């Protein structure tokens, strides 16, 4: 079973559309997935990572695509387990075995038992996945790739920015010359390399949380991982984080995948309370998106994509 949410940004939907149409095939058709496919297992982590990166390359190399086009993504692949062919981390939680794949950290392994539902969640950006138990307990399967909430990402970005690499050809462009002229008039030294800062509103006031600028007057993004965005800072990568989880046999949970348009206005407890109002997952998804849209409207927030998928597991 496969489910996903893609949240596009920029001036076109090209990146999100490409992810929607191609990512599943890229994962299953990758050489890294050959062994898993033969054994009817979940895809190897490398197959998922390479599929994300292959999509990123496709978008970046397309000369006809607006360079600010990109997408956040959250994908989940699930499989009913046969005995002894899924390895996951040991965890004290009685209902779920969870492991954040940190690419190289040591973990204690255990084997999923026959009848368990085993899954891999992968994500870039600020789309999220939640698992809600029958009793309303919430497990956040993802953590936003944003500087102000993800300390690991901030440390990774800061390490990359220490290189102070100048984008090739930038300082020779007319745009950069105008940027320098404007900066000199107000006594600012422009930066020809990426940096962390905050945006300025039309009234000159600083607004919002930290973002990553490609260079002074360059593209800025709140997210630290994205598919596409070829004009963004080079520290913004398409490599997804991957998390494994096991839902034990005869236990039920509700899986929520959604874009940040939902989570900007509702926290996890609110979401769990709302989806408990209906036993129909399709109606639950519509309820969440409708409620989020109205809350954004009446709170004065800007219009944003609100995509919600609700799956009942077991």
Image (tube, grey):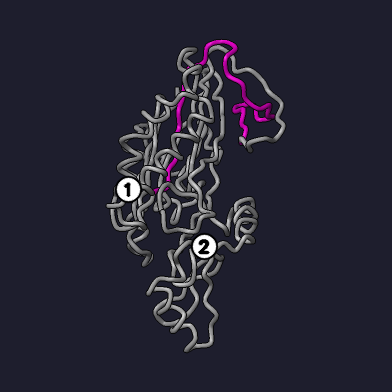
> What secondary structure predominates along the stretch shown in magenta?
strand
Most foreground residue, 136 or 264: 264
In what element is the residue under mark 1?
A: loop
Identity of the residue drawn at 42% across and 40% down:
257
> Can see residue 58?
yes
Query: In the rendering, at what x and y percent does residue 169 appear?
Result: 44, 64
Q: Quadrant of the image for the C terminus?
A: top left
Query: In the rendering, at what x and y percent does residue 214 appear?
Result: 48, 63
Query: In the rendering, at what x and y percent does residue 88 appear?
Result: 62, 25
Residue range in magenta is 71-100
Alpha-carbon span between mark 1 and mark 2: 23 Å
User: Badge 2, how many Cα within 10 Å: few under 14, some, many 20+?
Assistant: many
In what element is the residue under mark 2?
A: strand
Most foreground residue, 36 or 133: 36
Marks counted in the figure total 2
Residue denoted by label 2: 212
131 left or right of 25?
right
Figure check: 303 above or below 197: above
Figure check: 157 above or below 247: below
Identity of the residue drawn at 55% across and 12% down:
114
Q: Quadrant of the image for the N terminus?
A: top left
Identity of the residue drawn at 45% across and 58% down:
232
Residue 217 inside the magenta-drawn segment: no
Identity of the residue drawn at 55% across and 80% down:
189
291 left or right of 87?
left
**Marker disc for residue 62:** 1
> Can see residue 288?
no
Query: In the rendering, at what x and y percent does residue 175 appear?
Result: 38, 73
């Amino acid at each position: 079973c496969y489910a996903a949410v893609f949240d596009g940004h920029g001036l076109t939907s090209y990146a999100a559309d490409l992810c929607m149409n191609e990512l599943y095939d890229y994962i299953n058709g990758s050489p890294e997935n050959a062994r898993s496919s033969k054994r009817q297992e979940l895809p190897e982590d490398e197959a998922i990572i390479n599929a994300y990166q292959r999509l990123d390359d496709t978008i970046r190399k397309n000369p006809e695509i607006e360079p600010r086009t990109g997408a956040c993504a959250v994908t989940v692949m699930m499989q009913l387990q046969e005995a002894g062919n899924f390895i996951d981390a040991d965890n004290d939680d009685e209902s779920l075995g969870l492991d954040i794949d940190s690419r190289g950290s040591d973990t204690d392994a255990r084997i999923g038992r026959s009848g368990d539902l085993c899954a891999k969640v992968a994500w870039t950006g600020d789309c999220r996945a939640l698992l809600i138990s029958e009793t309303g307990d919430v497990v956040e399967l993802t953590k936003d790739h944003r500087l102000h909430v993800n300390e690991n990402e901030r440390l990774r970005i800061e390490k990359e920015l220490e290189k102070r690499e100048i984008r090739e050809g930038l300082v020779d462009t007319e745009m950069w010359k105008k940027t320098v002229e404007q900066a000199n008039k107000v006594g600012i030294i422009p930066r020809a390399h990426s940096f962390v800062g905050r945006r300025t509103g039309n009234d000159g006031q600083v607004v919002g949380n930290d973002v990553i600028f490609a260079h002074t007057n360059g593209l800025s993004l709140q997210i630290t991982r994205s598919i596409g965005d070829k004009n963004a800072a080079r520290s913004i990568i398409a490599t997804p984080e991957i998390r494994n989880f096991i839902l034990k046999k005869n236990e039920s949970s509700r899986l929520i995948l959604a874009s940040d348009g939902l989570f900007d206005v509702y926290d996890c407890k609110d979401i769990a309370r709302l989806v408990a109002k209906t036993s129909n997952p399709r109606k639950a998804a519509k309820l969440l998106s409708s409620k989020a849209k109205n809350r954004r409207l009446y709170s004065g927030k800007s219009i944003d994509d609100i995509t919600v998928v609700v799956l009942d597991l077991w």
